[in-house]
Amino acid sequence: MEQKKENRKNKKTEEFSHAKINWYPGHMEKARREMTEKLKAVDLIIELRDARIPEASKNPMLNEMAQNKPRLIVLSKIDYADPKAVREWAAYFKEKENCSCIAVDLLNDNKCGKKIIAEALQVTKPMRDRQIAKGIHPRAVRAMACGIPNVGKSTMINRINGKNTVKAADKPGVTRSLTWIHADPDLDLLDTPGVLWPKFEDQRTGSLLAAIGSINDDILDQKMLAMDTIHAIQNLYPGKLEEIYEAGEVNPNGMLKAIAVKRHFRKEEDALDLKRAAQAFLFDLRHGKLGRLTLEGVPHEKNQ
Ligand SMILES: Nc1nc2c(ncn2[C@@H]2O[C@H](COP(=O)(O)OP(=O)(O)OP(=O)(O)O)[C@@H](O)[C@H]2O)c(=O)[nH]1
Ligand SMILES: [Mg+2]
């Protein structure tokens, strides 16, 4: 009986460890439909991506939805990202996706609103020039702010508007409806809910999105996620975590143990609390406490 129970428990853990992370609740599908409808009234798409995962935070459904609308990529949270990698990604998107791209710190840079407005006007200049040629005074550009959950869409709108008009908070899924904001005399902005897509192309994409906090933590095995992410950081930034957490040369599980020892996370009977260590590690990563990191590099062959 006990053995059977144990087997079932192991099977569950095993199934979970190979399960794909996916988060596509009904409100996202609803938002996707509403965004597609609203696109007719939109001159420009401002797509926010997280500067720590510039490729994994790209919504593959957007190309299909956006058709030929002008597009501006805003790489957010550069205060948490590796400056060299951000420069490389911005150049890559300009070249490969033929898109304007601007990298910003929406939280601390109070000039970034003006920079985004200037870029939005630049991207839509042909449209505005056509209006002027017809003798029409160009109206405010209508832009849809879209992107994955928790990337900073609402924060960007508040920055441009100069006040806290829409709700922004440090968890995914805060915005639930589409709202137009007359954010600047030259720019109307549509705030939209963060949207993911029904199936991630690979497990890595899901892990990266979860690592930066764009997926509801309630559906995640945080210990597994932390170990995946530790592994990725150990490859990209050798020695960095070892130094921060005062660990020797250890594997991801050993790193969690080192964190638990350093922070005195213990359960009953003095065993190390690795779940709490995983949560602490993810918190540190998500709040820039591990320094400025970008978790994926520009594809090498395309970077020549
Ligand atoms: N450090 C830093 N934090 C940022 C930046 N941009 C946004 N944030 C923070 O990220 C969190 C999420 O911001 P939101 O504006 O609510 O993100 P959102 O994309 O609207 O999220 P949803 O509505 O849930 O899809 C908030 O705690 C913001 O303060 C940035 O450039 N740097
Ligand atoms: Mg929002």
Image (tube, grey):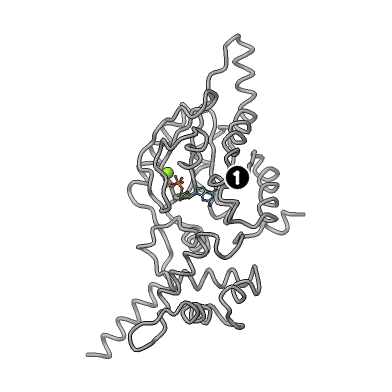
Q: Nearer the viewer, residue 114 or 172?
A: 114
166 lies left or right of 248: left
Q: Residue drawn 39% across and 65% down? A: 220
Q: Nearer the viewer, residue 200 or 48?
A: 48
Relative height, residue 190 to residue 208 (above, below):
above
Q: Quadrant of residue 71?
A: top right
> x, y (%) of residue 298?
67, 56
20 lies left or right of 66: left
Which quadrant, please, contains the C terminus? bottom right
Circle 1 is placed at which residue position?
A: 104
Within-10-Å neighbours for mark 1: few <14, some 14–19, many 20+: many
Relative height, residue 270 to residue 131 (above, below):
below
Q: Residue drawn 44% across and 50% down? A: 149
Mark 1: is the Cβ under 8 angstroms from ligand 1?
Answer: yes
Which quadrant, please, contains the N terminus? bottom left
> x, y (%) of residue 39?
46, 31
Q: Amino acid at mark 1?
A: Val
Ligand 2 position by quadrant: top left
Relative height, residue 123 to residue 54 (above, below):
above
